[in-house]
Image: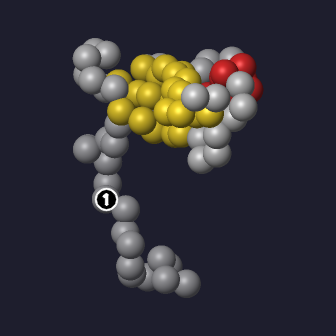
Amino acid sequence: MQQTPLRHLALSVDEPEPGLYHWMILESEDAMKTWFVVEASDDAYDTFSEAWEDGASTLRGMGDGQYGPRAEAAEDESADPVLETGPGVDD
């Protein structure tokens, strides 16, 4: 089975106020020139380490443990269209 490419993800910890740490998972889709936040902690952590560990746990959960987080497969433009309504679809 052919796999899609690995996603370009990075974990970062920010300290917006002294002693309050937040993790962020960033993703790049343009050869790592621009990054955007895809996940972030809602609550602050008391230590950098706590924020890092929770962020790393979230990052691990974003993909298969063996193969990592993969990009979604591109839609096959040559495939037959999927019916959203019609006989057998609304049943």
Q: Nearer the viewer, residue 60 or 54?
A: 54
User: Residue 35 appears in which quarter of the rendering?
Assistant: top left
Tell me which amino acid carries mark 1: Pro
Looking at the image, residue 26 sits to the left or right of residue 64; the answer is left
Q: Nearer the viewer, residue 90 or 38?
A: 38
Name which residue lies at 59% across and 41% down: 41
The residue tagged 1 is 81
Name which residue lies at 55% across and 84% down: 91
Looking at the image, residue 42 sits to the left or right of residue 47; the answer is left
User: Residue 50 appears in which quarter of the rendering?
Assistant: top right
Looking at the image, residue 77 sits to the left or right of residue 60; the answer is left
Q: Can the viewer see residue 31?
A: yes
Residue 5 percent across, percent down from the top left: 43, 20
Name which residue lies at 49% across and 83% down: 90
User: Residue 20 appears in which quarter of the rendering?
Assistant: top right
Looking at the image, residue 90 sits to the left or right of residue 44; the answer is left
